[in-house]
Amino acid sequence: MRKGWHSISKMILGCLLLLASAALAQEQPGNPEYSWLNGKWKGRSLSNAPFEMELRVMNDNEVKGSGVLQDRQTGRLRPVAASIAGVVKGTKVTLDVDYGGTDKYKLRFSYVDGKLRLKRKNDEVDYDKIE
């Protein structure tokens, strides 16, 4: 009887530890200061193609999201999906945009007058919030 109870108590403890680690692994809400970043944004990519991204702030200042680039290939626009991860600090947003494979870009934005401003080599592009 004693051996059976010991096995059961180990199993219960294991289940409790599993539940606790799952709760810790869940995403936490983002800092309310950065709620302006949550939503859909539309602008132009580094290649000047239309780019739309949906962003969400979580775990204080982490940014997660997805994007769709309207790439021009053979004269036609075709959507290319991207995963997005980054951080927001004050009015600065740094995003890593990954189109899969070797197509990865680091974009640095500033939040100015309700827009995300992307500084490029010779110009700036504003992203407008659309939702």
Image: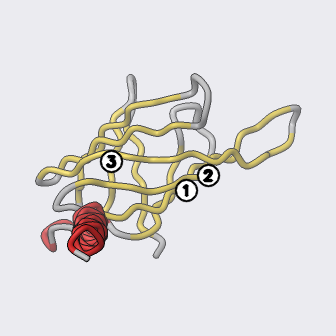
Q: Nearer the viewer, residue 33 or 72?
A: 33
Identify the residue under disc 1: 52
Question: How many labels sit on residues?
Answer: 3
Q: Which three-letter amino acid code belongs to the residue tagged 1?
A: Glu
Residue farthest to the front? 1
The local secondary structure at tag 2 comes to: strand
Which of discs 1 and 3 lies nearer the camera? The answer is 1
Of the numbered discs 3 and 2, the one sitting upstream in the chain is: 2
| Image-based side of 69 in relation to 52, left or right | right
| Cα distance between the residues tagged 1 and 2 | 5 Å
Label 3, label 2: how many angstroms apart (C-alpha)? 18 Å
Residue 100: mark: none
Residue 117's tag is 3
Q: Nearer the viewer, residue 100 or 119?
A: 100
The amino acid type of the residue labelled 3 equals: Arg
| Mark drawn on residue 68 | 2
- Vertical arrangement, residue 95 with respect to residue 34, above or below: above
Q: Earlier in the sequence, mark 1 or mark 2?
A: 1
> Which percent across, then down, holds residue 117?
32, 48
Q: Position of residue 105 (x, y in %)?
A: 45, 30
Say whether residue 71 is left or right of residue 40. right
